[in-house]
Image (cartoon, helix red, strand yellow):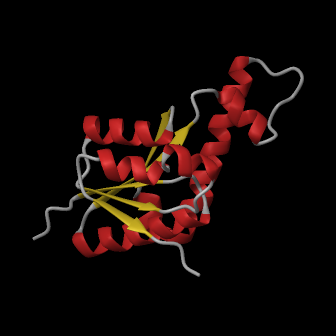
């Protein structure tokens, strides 16, 4: 019997994180584990709204927040839909802040037996500060399975 009963899968809704989700859901099916899919929204809803082209001239803080929450809900649905019942059964968690730090803080507070996450390509920020995956690997209180990109 496996000790992996709770699998945490961080997502930024990219192709790489969808591949990690597929791996996490297969692992969960094999082990009879629960899956929590975690997305981290930047500390500023405004930043997300600007980056996603959601802003209107008459927006208030509340309408911006609502738009970002709806965007995240829709992206979760799009990400999980191809996985049928397994995707529908996954718990959705939305955090706010710096992704690497928020994921580690979530793991410390709420637990998880293993993290399954994608590895993104290096960019200047990753080279200087370390990627979110690197932060989680270094600080996670539980094992981390990193799913590599294909190709």
Give the percent coordinates (x, y) of residue 128. Answer: 54, 45
Relative to 118, is 93 above or below? above
Residue 23: x, y in percent? 41, 71
Residue at 22% across, 55% down? 113
Asked whether the viewer can see residue 122, the reply is yes
Say which of 127 and 86 sits in front.
127
Identify the residue at image location x=72%, y=27%.
64
On screen, residue 42 above or below 33 = above
- Quarter-of-image position of residue 8: bottom left
Residue 91 in view in this figure: no
Within the image, what quadrant is residue 53 found in?
top right
Left or right, 118 with reference to 122: left
- The residue sitting at 41% across, 37% down in the picture is 101
Q: Between residues 122 and 37, which one lies in front from this camera angle?
A: 122
Q: Residue at x 46, y 66 (%)?
A: 20
Q: Is residue 100 left or right of residue 6?
A: right
């Amino acid at each position: 019997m496996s000790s992996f009963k709770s699998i945490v899968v961080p997502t930024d809704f990219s192709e790489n994180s969808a591949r990690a989700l597929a791996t996490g859901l297969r692992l969960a099916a094999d082990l009879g584990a629960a899956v929590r899919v975690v997305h981290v929204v930047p500390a500023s809803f405004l930043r997300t709204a600007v980056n996603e082209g959601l802003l209107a001239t008459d927006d208030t803080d509340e309408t911006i927040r609502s738009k970002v929450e709806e965007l995240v809900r829709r992206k979760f649905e799009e990400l999980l839909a191809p996985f049928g019942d397994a995707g529908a059964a996954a718990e959705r968690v939305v955090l706010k802040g710096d992704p690497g730090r928020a994921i580690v803080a979530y793991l410390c507070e709420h637990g998880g037996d293993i993290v399954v996450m994608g590895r993104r390509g290096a960019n200047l920020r990753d080279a200087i500060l370390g990627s979110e995956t690197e932060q989680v690997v270094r600080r996670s209180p539980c094992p981390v399975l990193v799913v590599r990109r294909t190709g």
